[in-house]
Each structure stands twice: as C-alpha cells, then as structure tokens.
Image (cartoon, rainbow, N blue to C red):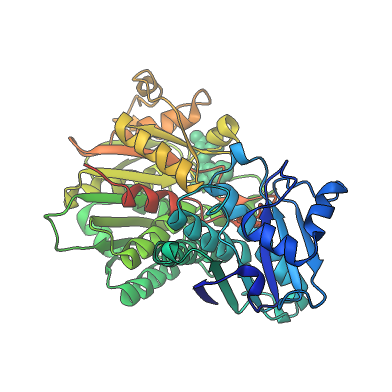
Amino acid sequence: MHIQVIQGALQETSADAIVVNLFEGVTTPGGATGAVDRALGGQISELIQQGDFRGKRKEVTVLYTRGALPAPRVILVGLGKAEAFTLEGVREAAALAVQQARKLGVTSLATLVHGAGVGGLDPQAAAEATVEGSLLGLYRFTEFKTTDEENHKPDLETLLLVEFDAAKLDAMRAGAQTGEILASATNFARDLINRPANVATPSHLAAEAQRIAAETGLRCTVLTPEEMETIGMHLLLSVARGSHEPARFIILEHNAERTDLPTVALVGKAITFDTGGISLKPAEGMEAMRSDMSGGAAVLGAMYAVARLNLPLRVIGLVPATENMPGGRATKPGDIVRSLKGLTVEIINTDAEGRLILADALTYAGRFNPKAMVDIATLTGACVIALGHAAAGVMGDDELVNKLRAAGERSGDRVWPLPLFEDYKEQIKSDLADLKNVGGRPGGALTAGMFLKQFVPDGIVWAHVDMAGMGLEEKGRPHVPKGGAGYGVRLFVDLLRNWRE
Ligand code: BES
Ligand code: ZN
Ligand code: ZN
C-alpha cells in the first residue's frame, strides 16, 4: 500500500472515502471533523443530536456526501472519552476506519491523523500510531485460502494522511515511516505464527531469518544440531530428540561489529509445535500449539524493525527453534541432561520444554557480553491463569522490568510484574541433578522464571516475559485480528528505541 502525508484540508481531498473522528460527549465537532460537518450542512451534528452517534470507542458509521465534497463517503469513528484517550485509541480508530473502508471496497482513503488535533497528542506519535493501526488492522492471513471471496476484493491501495498545519508535516512524515516499519515487522511475525507447523518448521524460521537479514543488512548465523552438539547445547537437543525436523539455533545481529555500542540480547522461544512430548498434551485444542514459537517470532520481528530503524545499539536476537514431539528417541520423564552452562537438569515433565531451550539460549547469549538480556516465551499456562489475556507476565531485575512496563504502556503490548522470590528455588531442586524442570502447580509461572534465572550469566541484567496468554488473539480486536497476534515485536522495539543506560 502507498502511504503519504500531505498538506491540505481533508474536506477538499479527493479519495474514495475520507475519515474523521469524534470524542464522546462532544456536541459541536471541531478541527477537520468540524470542517467536514459544515461542508455537509451539519449532518454530523445532526447524528449527535439524534443520539445516533455518540463518539463511543469503536463506534463507526458511514455518511454519503452527495456531491457536497470531492469524496463520496465519510467514515466517522468514535474515540471514546477525551480524558481516557491514548495512542492505543489512535491505533484502534485507524484500524476500524480501514476495515470499514475495505468492507465498502474502496481503494483510496484520506484520513486525519487521529489525536493530533483536538486530542492533543504529539503529531509524530499520532501519525505513527495512525499508520501502525491502519496496517495492523488490515492484516489478514490468506496464504492457504484458495477460494475465499474476500480474497478477491481489491485491498486499500492508497492511504493519505491529511494535515492542514504545514508545521506538523515533517514530524508526521517521520512518524508515518516508523509506523509502517512497526506494523510490517508485527505482520511478519503474525505470518510466522499463523503458518501451520508443517510449514513453519525450525528450518523455515531460519530461512525467514536469513531472508530479513539479506534485506536489511543484519548478520545471520544458524547453528545445526551437529554444531549444537559440539558446543554442548544438550538441553535444546533434548527437546528436539523426538522430532524428525532438525532443530535450529538462529542468531541475528544488528551492528554486529559495534562493540562500542550498548549491547542488548533478545531471546525468543520457538517451539514450532508443542505436543508436550512423552508428557503428551490432551488432543483438544492442541492445534493452538503451533503458536508456541510466538516468542521467537517476536524476536525475529523486532530484529527486522531494529535493523530498518537503524537503532544506535548493538542488538542480538537469539531464537532456539525445535518441535517438541514424542518418539522412540524422545526424552523421557526422569532423564537427566547437562546444559550448555554445565548444570544438570532432571526432566520431570517433557511438556516444560520452553525453559530448557531458553536456558541454553540465555547461556549462549553471554558470549556477546550484553548489558542486558530479555527473553520472551509462551512459557506457562499458569501465567494465563494469573493474568488472562490482558498482559504478559514480566519477572527479573527491577529496573529492566520497569523499562518493559513503560514500553508496554506506550506500545500497547502490555506487561505486568510478577515476583521471583528466592522461595521458588526450593521447588525446582532435584534429588538427583542440580535442578528439575518443573516446580509443581503453585506459582507455575514463577518457578519457570526462577529456573531461567539459574542460566543467566553473572552480572548481566535480565528480564523474562511470559507471553503464554498473548500469542494468539482469540476474539479479535480492531488492530489485532484473530490469530497470531505478533505480540512482543512492538514491545521490544519500544524498549530499544527508548534505551538509556
Ligand atoms: N507451551 C506451553 C505453555 C502454554 C500454555 C502456552 C498455554 C500457551 C498457552 C508450555 O510448554 C507448557 O506446556 N507448559 C506447561 C508447564 C508445566 C508442565 C510445568 C504448562 O504450563 O502446563
Ligand atoms: Zn510444553
Ligand atoms: Zn511450550
């Protein structure tokens, strides 16, 4: 899609439809919405007076201009109460408008920048969120639909952001560009998640990593099982044993040679399908476990955006990727395996596999000597019980946890802190080995976090994001359609854009 920021009056812009907005409780619209209202002889005011449009969040309606404006249609979206309005409201409004446009079959759309006028938001941030929300809202996964009618409708071809105040244009252009990068990176992650496990194998993820590396200049290295064996990544290999698909350890580096820059490592769990292994999961709903690579997808998507934004940091993305399958050679409950770090682990439950592959990846991340590492994973059902689908859990060093909280609020990829009390360590002590991989039902998300902590190299600031409740969007929200959510990409990019030592 072609996206452009232009100077002008929205009501005078030619397009198949123009988009305006309204806060709840406003009786006389102002700004671009007011100008459109006047040009339409007060039609929008009339809608408000009649109580037919209240400006509630997620409210949308279409008006026809019948020759009064160059554009034949006006899409009006509600923004909710002005006091509660944030960038997330901009993303939602933008997504709803483009979805309405697509329903109408229009191919060119002109929109105001939601929140930049009456909303009082920073023009650059508002333009970024308008483009981001539009592209996130238009996302759909159709790779395997051969007969779907919807597929043959033309998609939106042009999106114009129209701003009257010339002084805001430069900032809005910069914002629009960033918004495009954030949304493309998130949609890239969504594609990886939505692809079924027979397509999105560990080798497929590695090939996609090499593709984005070739496009952006990232350095990409992929370790094979033989190479993992040589260096002693036995926890990762223990998870891969039941599978016929070879495991991959994907390494992406931004500013690889710039060891003078602050270095941050991102680590993402990529179990391309989690059957549970010998500790087999029940059949019902198991298909959702193709999304058990969402953490890895978040890291790949974030690295793609980091490279395109050319952030002034050295960023390392690590993605341990494997299936978790039962099989004649699969790891058995009670098996003891030596980690890359040297600690031995008694594998009580083969379904607690995410922490095993992450443990070796966290150890490996130490080679890059980062200031900080953050891992992200669809790690525990317990975290879903704790927080539902409203936020990911975050554990680890306070300052980094706080940075992630702020990044979550700004980006909309919300995280919420959970504790890592020393007490949880008791639960993962093994009689036979240094550690066991499960700590029983109580505090399941926290014992998983405590397990990971044992593998963080000394002196490195670390946080763990458990996104088990956030990988798949179940109902569909305006800018997060049903399916792979692409959660974490924008969280990480926001964290890194605002990185201060
Ligand atoms: N991938 C699952 C966790 C998960 C659950 C992700 C629901 C998304 C939605 C993970 O590998 C797992 O199976 N965890 C077990 C751990 C238990 C055996 C200690 C769990 O949470 O039940
Ligand atoms: Zn599992
Ligand atoms: Zn899993």
Residue 297 position in % (x across, y down): 45, 58
Residue 294 position in % (x across, y down): 49, 54
Q: Is residue 262 visible?
A: yes
Residue 402 position in % (x across, y down): 36, 33
**Horizontal side, residue 432 vs residue 130: left or right:** left
Viewer-side residue, 413 vs 437: 413
Residue at screen point 33% across, 52% down: 497
**Horizontal side, residue 333 vs residue 112: left or right:** left
Residue at screen point 80% across, 63% down: 41
Residue 52 position in % (x across, y down): 85, 50
Viewer-side residue, 116 vs 473: 116
In the depicted structure, whether residue 64 falls above or below residue 231? below
Q: Is residue 330 visible?
A: no
Quadrant hosting residue 310: bottom left
Question: Seen from this angle, which residue lies furthest left?
Answer: 260
Q: In what quadrant of the picture does the N terminus appear?
A: bottom right
Quadrant hosting residue 196: bottom right
In the depicted structure, whether residue 247 falls above or below residue 30? below
Q: In what quadrant of the picture does the C terminus appear?
A: top left
Q: How many marks?
A: 0
Quadrant hosting residue 102: bottom right
Question: Seen from this angle, which residue lies furthest right?
Answer: 50
